[in-house]
Amino acid sequence: MRDMKSFLANLSHYPGVYQMLGEKDEVLYVGKAKDLKKRVSSYFTKKSQDLKTATLLKYVIDIDITVTNTESEAVLLECNLIKKFKPRYNVLLRDDKSYPYILISTQHSFPRMDLYRGQRKKNGRYFGPYPSAYAVRETISLLQKIFRIRTCKDGFFAARTRPCLLYQIERCTGPCVNLISSTDYAQHVKLAELFLEGKNNELFTELEKKMLEASTSLHYEAAAQYRDQIVRLRQIQDKQYINVAEADDADVIGFARETNTTCIQLISIRGGQILGSRSYYPSAPLHSEEEEIISAFLAQHYLGELSRQEMIPKQIIMQKLPSDSQLLERVLAEQGGHSVKFISPSRGEKTKWLAMATTSAKQSLSLHVFGKSQMEERLQALQMELQLPKLPMRLECFDISHTMGEATVASCVVFDRQGPLKSDYRRFNVTGIVPGDDIGAMTQVLHRRFKRLQKDQVAPPDVVFIDGGMLQLEAARKVLEEFKLLNIFLVGVSKGPDRKAGFETLHYIDRPPMHLPADSLALHFIQQIRDEAHRFAITGHRLRRDKSRRQSSLELIPGIGAKRRRDLLRYFGGIQGIAHASLDELMKVPGINRFLAERIFATFHDSTI
């Protein structure tokens, strides 16, 4: 590496972009800076060298500097360089498609509706952009059903001598053979445009007006068609999960991460309507922070191409704002030609939007991680790393969860070639052990599990993962020997320092412990299985613990015997109903006076009697 002391001393304080280069002049990392001297110098101080930075600097041979006039120019240049070189230590958004619109042509007497990508050069009205082609096709299909606008190409339209199948199934009005006049067809197009613009009130007013006119003129069939359109549109409106009436243009960003895989779910709202959502899976270096990934996504998603800049919304809603949010707001506003505001809501309607996006991100990530093609790759990687004679077909993982020995629950999760086999998941309530004895708990659970498998004559798993070290692994070995299951491969998975992902130790019965590389596909798979077992165990533990605590609290209330407990449970439908009942509601239960109601209320609300 060059003489860094001299290099840093001669750096300017101007804004710009720096490229960290490897041994073969390949670009390892691209970053932007308000002050190049301060930013680049910060990499070479001990305080700033987190694990990711320390790993990066091991491979840096040279640094290339580009000075810009403003910070905004630095952001744009950084974005373009990342897309060009795809550095391995940057967050990379693998998406090179332009975003689709719905185009309603205007040069034809019977306008056509179609999906359109690219720069908006064709004559017509554009609606969108939509987050995915699927969202566009869904919307077009809906508009065909309700307003019956044609989607055929002009050449096909001109060559028709009789109506096509779409007319027969009532998806088109047959303008190609003059079954509808251009004036009436234009009315259909106008109504569709009102729908696409989100002007629902105007749309319903127009439809109700036309229905009344048709009915007054004794055109009952036409009136019935308008009525059906109104009913269908009302149903669509009622199915909206969230109320976006107050929204203008906004994007809602949901974030989910599992081991080394990240999902960003983007929900697009335009003109007060949800246009759809789309999942992104950026490639992020190990130990990247959420704010860093979001910042990179915002820059790479919205900047660099004209078609992207046209879709910059006025509001971008996310859970955590990136550290450079003010700079990104300013750059996006310059590129979009309007103000842009980043919002991290803590209450109100926008929190519901964010919750929906986050839930969608988690679901999309789960489907992505355990996709069939990826499962094959993970199983092959696992076979190679564990040196298994054949591809494992069934994997099981066991975990123990308790709170200082209270309400101990164990989990068993099962994976096969399709991913998680949730129908075979099992929980075990552990009893009869010394509180906090994880070894005893693991022994009991494995004994119960394999006794049941043998009784039901179910094929045993090929690999069993145990959440723990050698003590837990040795306990598992003794149980398997007892049942003469000697062909099951046992692996103990113990957490790394500070429970950091990527530092797990794998323990074996007849081999020394080992650490897999942090980017190992087999390690990621093991982490996912272990995390799923932990999630399933801790969920069961919390349910058991809460039930135990509440039930014991009800039994310990003076004056509440078996009969009154039964009456309370019947009246409120369970312990949850009692816990959420008001004082007045408790007094309505037969046999519960105000004095007892106050005691019950105080018990469940941690207040004094």
Image (cartoon, grey):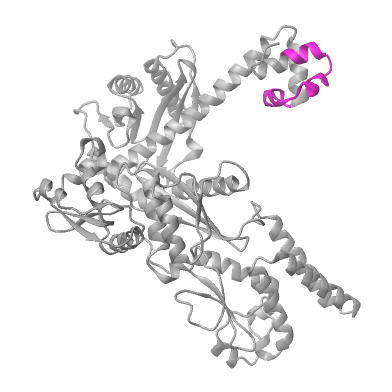
Farthest residue to the top: give it: 558
Relative side of 212 to 492, left or right: right
Q: Is residue 584 magenta?
A: yes
Q: Residue at x 21, y 43 (%)?
A: 55
The front one of 396 and 132 is 132
Relative side of 390 to 344, left or right: left
Say which quarter of the image contains residue 250. bottom right
Inspect this view and state whether residue 249 appears: yes
The front one of 564 and 294 is 294
Relative side of 97 to 63, left or right: right
The spot of residue 217 in percent (x, y) is 90, 80
Q: Residue at x 64, y 51 (%)?
A: 242
Q: Residue at x 39, y 32 (%)?
A: 397
The spot of residue 520 in percent (x, y) is 26, 43
Q: Main secondary structure of the magenta part?
A: helix
The spot of residue 153 in percent (x, y) is 55, 84
Tally of marks? 0
The front one of 556 and 523 is 556
Q: Quadrant of the C terminus?
A: top right
Q: Is residue 245 above or below residue 3?
A: below
Q: Residue at x 26, y 57 (%)?
A: 17
Say which quarter of the image contains residue 502. top left
The spot of residue 489 in percent (x, y) is 29, 32
Magenta stretch bounds: 573-599
Inspect this view and state whether residue 458 appears: no
